Image: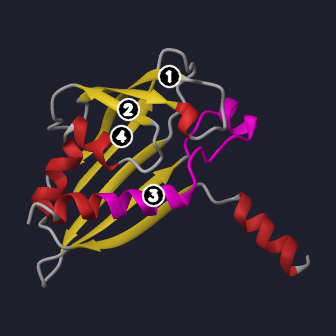
Amino acid sequence: MAAEQQEKAQDETVERFEVTRFIAAPATRIFGLLCDPDGHVAIDASGMLQAADGEPVRAAGDSFVVHMDREAMNDLPLGRYDVTVEITRFEQDTLIEWTPTSPMLQPAVNHHFGYRLRPTENGTTEVTTYYDWSRIHEQYRAAGIFPLLPELSLRATLGILARTVEQRV
């Protein structure tokens, strides 16, 4: 197989984006923002998250509603809609993961977003964000629409997160 074909075959098997950045803020401050529904809206680089309703999450199983606008991505004609963000993993100040759900999407998509935080010796926090679509329902896999977000959106969101929490230092 030619090198170009081999590279394309490898690209097609990627089912997770992961981006890391060091942020000059304590993990507790960053995690607090990630638990707050309004924090998700504040740091979103895609432009899709318009507003949120709900209390800050404190455990796996908690949820909140996000009002979305897919027109920001200009890729799927979904317009405005709501999703429920369901927390699937939660380790205080260390890990938060969620999956967006919606009654209009049946069966459930089952893609996951998350953040891992690791304090460093110099007072910064190593923040890794990820988008994982490896567990999506076969119906969505067959549609060939994943990933829904480019890796660049994750990197940009980390930049906004850094700017947001570092201003409070």
- The residue depicted at 77 percent of the width and 73 percent of the height is 7
Q: Amino acid at mark 2?
A: Gln
**Magenta stretch bounds:** 134-160
Q: How many marks?
A: 4
Q: Amino acid at mark 4?
A: Trp
Answer yes or no: is residue 91 visible.
no
Residue 154's label in the rendered image is 3
- Label located before the other in sequence (2 or 4): 2
Residue 98's label in the rendered image is 4
Q: Are dots 2 and 1 in contact, CB under 8 Å? A: yes
For label 4, the crowd category at 10 Å Cα-Cα, with few meaning under 14, some 14 to 19 and many 20 or more, is many
Scheme of colours in the image: secondary structure
Q: Is residue 142 left or right of residue 152?
A: right
Q: Secondary structure at mark 1?
A: strand
| Residue at far right of view | 1
Between marks 2 and 4 in the image, the one whose residue lies nearer the viewer: 2
Q: Amino acid at mark 3?
A: Leu
For disc 1, the marked residue is 80
Vertical arrangement, residue 37 with respect to residue 94, above or below: above
- The residue depicted at 85 percent of the width and 76 percent of the height is 4
Residue 75 at what x, y percent from top left?
A: 66, 38
Residue 150 at what x, y percent from top left?
A: 58, 54
For disc 2, the marked residue is 50
Residue 55's label in the rendered image is none
Vertical arrangement, residue 41 with respect to residue 68, above or below: below
Between marks 4 and 3 in the image, the one whose residue lies nearer the viewer: 3
- Label located before the other in sequence (2 or 3): 2
- Quick check: is 144 in the magenta stretch? yes
Between marks 4 and 1 in the image, the one whose residue lies nearer the viewer: 1
Q: Are dots 2 and 3 in contact, CB under 8 Å? A: no
